[in-house]
Structure formats: C-alpha cells, structure tokens
Image (spheres, grey):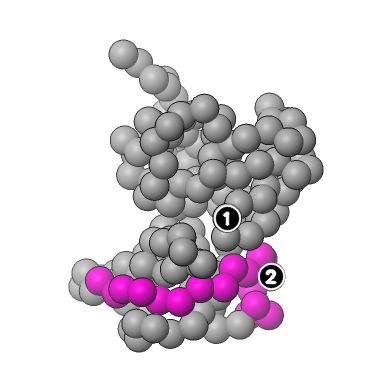
Amino acid sequence: RLAQFDPPEMLYARPRSIKVADFMGISNILRGRIKEQNRVETAIGTFCVEEQAEFADGESVHLALRPEAIDIIGAPEDTAHQAIPGTIAARNFLGASVCYTVLCGETPVLVSEPTRRLLNVDSAVWLGIAPDSIWLMPGTDEQEH
C-alpha cells in the first residue's frame, strides 16, 4: 500500500507518518504535545520547531530527529539553537563517522557525526538541535523509537 508519494528528498526530510519515517531510517522519534504553534513538549524537554499549521495547541504528535541533524556540544551557550542535556551511553566508531547513543533522562537519542573527534562514554554533553531540523507527524501511530 502506498503510504506517501513524494520526491526522495521530501520522503527523507518530511515523512508524513511513523511508518514512512521508519522506512526512511529515522531512528529518533519522540512523543510530544503541541504547547504553542512552534513549541513541542516531550519527555526530554521542550523543543522550538518551525511552525506547522496542520497541528493545533494541545495536539499529540510525534517529533522526528535525524541523528545527523543533531550537534553534540560542550555547553548550551555553544549553540544558537536549543540545547538538551544528556550523557553519552555508547559510542560506535564507523570509520568516517561515529554514532553516539546519548541518554537524555531515560530516553536514548542517536547522534551521528563525522569522525573529527571521539567523545568518551559517560561524558556529560548537550545536544544542539535547530528548529528546522525537527519534523512533526500525527501522534496516531503506535510505533515509537
């Protein structure tokens, strides 16, 4: 069954459902609730997002974050964007890139970055997340990552 018909870059960046996001490899999907048109409250913090008019205040949504769109930073002031605190729980060296599992509270968030540095497990870090790198989907699908 056809779930979404769009150019590849749109499927990758703006999936319309968790099933499409999962198929396109998005590994960070969080439940959230719209607080205002451009703010979403989740278990790991409140995110500023680009306004998406199809969602109303109080509506349940899923928030999608691509691992490569998240920056690991040393302090909240190191980013012009929002910063979420976390601790590196695992590091997977992949040659040209490294994939970190960062625990934000009890929620694991995957972060992928080029291998320009190797951060140690158990290091306290902040995740810098730009509002335009977050995509919202309806909160009706049951699958969550």
Q: Dot 1, how many residues are within 10 Å of its Cα: few (below 14), some (14-19), or many (20+)?
A: few
Q: CA distance from mark 2 to mark 1?
A: 22 Å
Residue at 47% across / 41% down in the picture? 13
Q: Is residue 53 left or right of residue 89?
A: right
From the image, state whether disc 2 or disc 1 is nearer to you. Answer: 1
In this picture, is 116 found above or below 20?
below
In this picture, is 99 found above or below 77?
above
Across and down, in percent, residue 63 comes to 54, 44
Across and down, in percent, residue 46 comes to 67, 56
Question: Which residue reaches farthest left?
Answer: 95
Q: Dot 2, how many residues are within 10 Å of its Cα: few (below 14), some (14-19), or many (20+)?
A: few
Depth order, front residue of 90/13: 90
Amino acid type assigned to the residue bearing label 1 in the image: Ala
Count of number-bearing discs: 2
> Which label was assigned to residue 80?
2
Residue at 34% across / 82% down in the picture? 121
In this picture, is 28 found above or below 93?
above
Q: Which residue is mark 1?
A: 43
What span is in magenta?
76-92
Residue at 60% across / 52% down in the picture? 42
Q: Is residue 75 left or right of residue 35?
A: left
